[in-house]
């Protein structure tokens, strides 16, 4: 299935999402900050990123804007998770409201995460 990077500053949420998605056949990595995510995305290939909005030091929105500025990552599906709706369109591929409905998560991931070509 798909290679997914889960980015959330709350360990319990990261772990829950990883367990649910791994049990559905996906290969998931988890990190706690947007900065860690940017480093991994630069070094590895992912089919989907699930990005929390509200994190310390750098928000999910700021990370998405940085990723979309790089031509290599313009087409990377990014699913934002947020407790409050965002005021602007930042270029995310989709949004999940917190608390996350796990059935909706599975459905949304299935529609967005297709393995990407390349190294």
Image (spheres, rainbow, N blue to C red):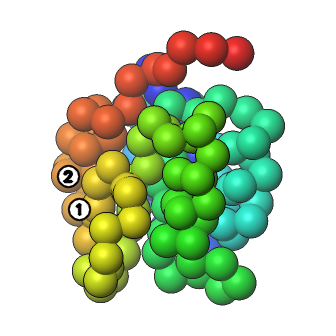
Horizontal arrangement in the rendering, residue 54 relative to residue 41 (left or right): left
Left or right of 105? Residue 16 is: right
Image point (50%, 20%), residue name: 116
Look at the image and tell me in which quarter the N terminus lies.
top left
Residue under pointer 1: 101
Tell me whether circle 2 and circle 1 mark residues in contact (CB < 8 Å): yes
Q: Which SS class for mark 2?
A: helix
**64 shown above or below 68:** below
Q: Secondary structure at mark 1?
A: loop
Quadrant where the image shows the C terminus: top right
Sort mark 1 into few (<14), some (14-19) or many (20+) by Cα contacts within 10 Å: few
Relative vertical location of residue 84 with respect to residue 96 in this rendering, above or below: below
Observer-nearest of 52 and 89: 89
What residue appears at the point 47 percent right and 20 percent down from the top-left corner? 115
The numbered disc on residue 104 is 2
Question: At 52% across and 60% down in the image, what residue appears?
Answer: 64
Whether 115 is drawn above or below 24: the answer is above
The image shows residue 52 at horizontal and vertical percentages of 48, 69
User: Mark 2 Cα within 10 Å, few/some/many (few <14, many 20+)?
Assistant: few
Q: Position of residue 53 (x, y in %)?
A: 47, 75
- In percent of the image, x 45 and y 36: which residue is there? 75
**Residue 24 - label:** none
> Total number of numbered labels?
2
């Amino acid at each position: 299935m798909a290679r997914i990077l889960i980015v959330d500053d709350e360990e319990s949420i990261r772990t829950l999402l990883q367990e649910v998605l791994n049990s559905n056949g996906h290969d998931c990595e988890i990190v706690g900050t947007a900065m860690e995510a940017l480093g991994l995305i630069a070094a590895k290939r992912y089919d989907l990123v699930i990005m929390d909005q509200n994190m310390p030091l750098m928000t999910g929105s700021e990370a998405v804007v940085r990723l979309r500025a790089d031509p290599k990552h313009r087409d990377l599906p990014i699913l934002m998770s947020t407790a409050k709706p965002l005021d602007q369109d930042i270029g995310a591929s989709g949004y999940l409201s917190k608390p996350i409905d796990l059935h909706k998560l599975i459905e949304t991931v299935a529609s967005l995460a297709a393995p990407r070509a390349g190294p």
